[in-house]
Amino acid sequence: MSLDYNLVSPELDPHAQLEEQETKSRVHLAIQNLPETEREVTTLYYIDEHSQKEIGAFLNLPTQTIKSRLHTARKRLQKRMLTMVKKNLQDERPSNDPDFQVKVIQELEETTQLTGREIQIMLRQVNTKDLALAMVNASDTFKKRIYANVSARVGKIIDDYIDSQMPVSDDRVAQNQTTVVEIVQALIAKGDIVWPPEQEKAPSKPLSKDYLEMKENLQKQLQDIPISHLDFETLTNTLVNLANVARAEGILNLERIVDDAKDPDGFFTLNLQLIIDGVAPNLVKEITAARKKVLLQQYESKLDMMMTGVQATQRGESPRMIEQKLRAMF
């Protein structure tokens, strides 16, 4: 193998020739920075093309020593070349290109023209942490559109994550903004988002008096009566009314209704909070199914304790013995 530091391939175009010359210069510089013993054998082996045996005879060293020095030199060169490449990539990264940054910011800001439904579709595809960092140097308009389409809980998560990551590099912000833009572009390509935006629709009709009364009664009922205590008919009506609110005002508006709902085991509010937060349907199903299993096990255990305690009382067992039995059950 031979490395010619003075010549470049004549068949390459001028730009490629320049790149090849720069690469060879970097390799030459890396070799020059090797320890003298390693630089000597590397030059003789790779540049002068002597065999390891010839180099050993020339330096009066065993062939194994030459082999070992070449091995060490190769590892050192790999590390130094990797460092050079990494630095070169950092120097050329997109965040250092003002035109690239401006383009990403412009495309990010264009998402504010999406409808609330389309923004929520986008948010279901974007990792919350990626979104948070993408918002760092975004406009107030963009931030307001995002906060208006996430739950209060998710909004706080975004704020807390941004605070925990500050200060954050421009490169990292640009990377996350690019991720958001690419997700929007993919959704447009699939037809999930309409672009360019359609003309603004006429304002929706004001909510009826009957609807507002239903909503008020629903909220009061959820505050006064634990959801698990409702009979089947009332529970059915309650869930249908919640669906009516979501249809009329959007899922996010359910958050205000259930904030103060009585829900001793938390199962109902868990279900609602997941959909309000925009969690994917399959994940909502998995999480709630797991919680349901735990609650059923706990309820079954309590029923067993009731049966055990009452039947032990019937048999005339001492209170202390009954207590020991019951405590052993949990």
Image: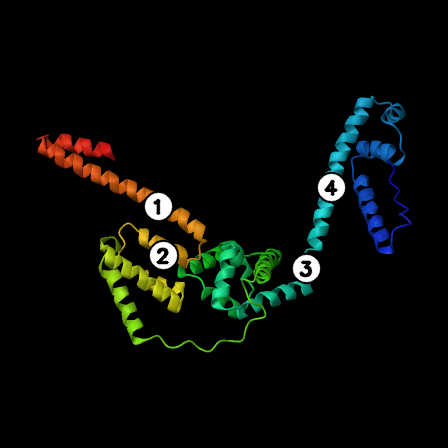
Q: CA distance from mark 3 to mark 1?
A: 48 Å
How many residues crowd around disc 4 within 10 Å: few (fewer than 14), some, or many (20 or more)?
some
Q: Mark 4, mark 1: which one is toward the viewer? A: 1
Residue in front for this viewpoint, 260 or 4 = 260
Q: Check disc 2 and give the amino acid type.
A: Leu
- Give the left or right position of residue 328, taking residue 129 as reference: left
Q: Which residue is mark 4?
A: 80
Q: Check disc 3 and give the amino acid type.
A: Asn
- First-in-chain label (4 vs 3): 4
Q: Check disc 1 and give the amino acid type.
A: Arg
Picture coordinates of residue 74 (x, y %)? 76, 34
How many residues crowd around disc 2 within 10 Å: few (fewer than 14), some, or many (20 or more)?
some
Residue 291 is marked as 1
Q: Which residue is mark 3?
A: 96
Q: Secondary structure at mark 1?
A: helix
- Give the left or right position of residue 293, taking residue 330 as reference: right
Q: Secondary structure at mark 3?
A: helix
Residue in front for this viewpoint, 270 or 178 = 270
Q: CA distance from mark 1 to mark 2?
A: 13 Å
